[in-house]
Amino acid sequence: MLQTQTGSNRTIFTLLLATITAVLTAKSSAGFSLTLLSLLSVFAFFALQTEPLLLFWLATSSVANYFIRYPWLQAVVTFDRVIISVLAISLVIQTLKNPKASISLSYFELFWLALTAITLIDTFTRSFTPQSLKLAVDVYLLPIVLFIVTKNSIHIAQYRFKLFTILIFLAYLLPIIGCYEFFTGSDLFSYPGSDLMRDAVIRPNGFFQADNSFAVISLLVAVALIYWPRLFKLELKSKLFWFLAIFSALLASLLPQFRAVAITAGLCLLISLLLLRGIKKSVRPLIIVFLLVMLFLPLYSVLRDSSFFQNRIANTTNAYSRVETYKVAIDVIKTNLLFGVGVGKYEDYFYQHYAPRKYASTQEELKKLPQSTPHNNLLAIMSEMGIVGAVAYLLSVFAVFVFSTSMIVKGGEERTLGAAIFTLWLAYTVVGMTLTSGYYSDVNLILFFFSALFLKSKELKQGVKDEPVEKIQA
């Protein structure tokens, strides 16, 4: 295993090399060889060293995915695909070299691998398009591979502080990028097909392909920061910097103006408070929050007449349209109950059978207008992969919540682990009831990576002595 200083130096050097190469190759038709040079450089410095590469991926993937892609529009070669492939190869080689090493799979991993197999089989047998293959690989295969690699390789006692530092950095960076896009209307990372303006509202997407990703990933970063110090035994001498990082990530999650994300953020904060402090110790903070709400309540009378409040918060058009969208999705499921319409085929099926014949011209017509995607993770999977895919997905999520609740019931340090995983997946699941957040690969990658890291906290309880409890001047 690399020494900490050596790993840090290699990380910095490779980061600089990749960044310089990315800038040189951005949107360049002649940049393929240089892009591969950057990726091969990463492999050369980190071959068989999964831990530094995992840190490198977390710190750079949001930006690197924008620059390191070829071709620019089709994105056959992407940063995530190459890096996670290298990680998988490294884990296999390390396992083969060590006779005592083994890769264990939990029920969650087995069920998600089954879901991945279903999507790949469906893609190659009846619904093959480049888009469906990307969906199967990026949304289902890469996240579970990253989860398995992280769970079976990273030495959390050595890297917990470095990971915490990266999370703090991301928490402060996300709202800066989001606020810039929100106030200027300039898309800093303009992916093909992405657009800041939707429903006559500027919705920042930051480093990511969609505003959904920006909002949900910011929320997941906030949740991870809430639990990180206690979960990984980091003593913060000053908690202000940490509190501000959590607030910063939460602020970033609100910038795209999704009501579901705002509600979920409040729910996650409440659950985190109750699970970490207990009901009795939570009374005082809840009273303070209540008084603050009462203090700022007069602002409601000022804001309720503003165009933003009327068009975005109080406007029920979107809610009625969402109900119509769900009705269509349910109808699609009934018609294609067993196997669905095919991976990545829902939108085509919608336009063939349910597309409106004329544009809506009034508010009442808009309310009755369904959208071309299900806007719900479960409905999306059921409509495209039928009952077969939905069962595998539901069993995966069920396995996560069974594990997390069993840890909460045990109490002690297991309670913190269970609470962290429960809150993380609750954020993902609740938002996924009104947004198809599960169809964004960057969201799934972050979710699975954080989940695997949380599981690694059990090593600290088992007496890992490579590093003492960190005392951080924050």
Image: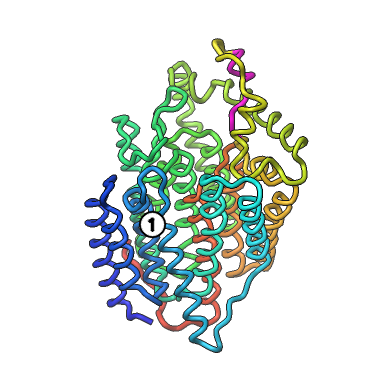
Residue 219 can be seen in this image: yes
Residue, x 36% and y 51% (percent of image)?
A: 69
Q: Is residue 378 above or below residue 229?
A: above
State the image coordinates of residue 25 (x, y, percent, origin top left): 25, 51
Name which quarter of the figure residue 421 lies in: bottom right
Q: Is residue 253 left or right of residue 135?
A: left
How packed is label 1: few (under 14 Cα within 10 Å), some, or many (20 or more)? many
State the image coordinates of residue 171 (x, y, percent, origin top left): 38, 51
Magenta span of residues: 364-373
State the image coordinates of residue 186 (x, y, percent, origin top left): 30, 33
Mark 1 lies on residue: 79
Classify mark 1: helix, strand or loop: helix
**Front-lying residue, 345 or 362:** 345
Residue, x 54% and y 22% (percent of image)?
A: 314
Residue found farthest to the top:
362
The secondary structure that dominates the magenta segment is loop
Residue 284 can be seen in this image: no
Name which quarter of the figure residue 42 lies in: bottom left
Name which quarter of the figure residue 107 lies in: bottom right
**Front-lying residue, 225 or 350:** 350
